[in-house]
Amino acid sequence: MRFWAFVVFVACTCTTSIVAQEAPKDGGAAVSPVQQNAWISAGIGGGGAGGNGIAGVVSGWYAYGPYVVGARASSGGPLFGGRQVREKAALVGLRARSAHTFALVGVGGGTMNGWRSNGEQSGTRTTYGDEPSIAFAAEAGVTYYAIGIGLDVFGASNHRTSYAGIALAVQLGYLK
């Protein structure tokens, strides 16, 4: 719960500075402000602890010039049985952008939890709770005003397991 409260706080703080960006009213030359953007991204694709399942990701990002901070939740695993992994992370990184494209990379810390099947015959599974993890993210997309489409590559690792995924994602927000 504290994680999502932090995410909401950061989103509200960042949004007010983006909304405050405006051109001078006296017709004078504008000082080129640092480009700020905020967006959410959601996607579905392939991945998981064994790399052979379905993975999904939801993230929120704020960019100030070339720097980005974000929060992400993702999950991955096979459709039936196997090892299911869920993670939440806070990330920092760098981005590059042009008029209608962007790319970013980020790393950070978070927590992972999940479960694994103990075999089809036993019908039982072993669960594990939230444990610290190191997370990574990479996004690239094509944007048009407030909407974008692109690829998200994401994953996390800790002492117990690691997983990764790639997803076709949609971005919505202040992207121009």
Image (cartoon, rainbow, N blue to C red):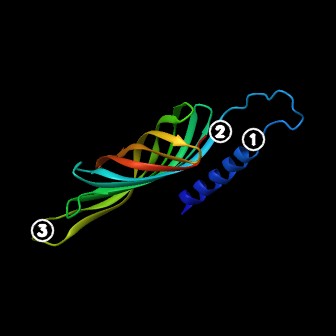
Amino acid identity at mark 2: Gln
Q: Is residue 155 left or right of residue 3?
A: left
Give the Cα distance between marks 1 and 3: 57 Å
Instruction: Residue at 24% x, 65% y: name it.
Output: 126
> Do the residues under discs 1 and 2 have CB atoms within 8 angstroms?
yes
Amino acid identity at mark 3: Glu
Considering depth in this image, is 82 or 62 the residue closer to the camera?
Answer: 62
Considering depth in this image, is 170 or 92 the residue closer to the camera?
Answer: 170
Q: Quadrant of the N terminus?
A: bottom right
Counting from the top left corner in percent of width and height, residue 82 is at 20, 59
Give the Cα distance between marks 1 and 2: 9 Å
Q: Which residue is mark 3?
A: 120
Element under disc 1: loop
Element under disc 3: loop
The tag on residue 129 is none
Determine crowd level at label 2: few under 14, some 14-19, many 20+ residues with C-alpha closer than 10 A: many
Q: Residue furthest left?
A: 121
Q: Which residue is mark 2?
A: 36
Counting from the top left corner in percent of width and height, residue 43 is at 41, 53
> Do the residues under discs 1 and 3 have CB atoms within 8 angstroms?
no
- Tell me the mark number nearer the camera, choosing from 3 and 2: 2
Instruction: Residue at 58% x, 54% y: name it.
Output: 7
- Considering only order in the chain, which callout, 2 or 3, is on the residue closer to the N terminus? 2
Amino acid identity at mark 1: Gln
Where on the picture, by quarter, is residue 129? bottom left
Q: Which residue is mark 1?
A: 21
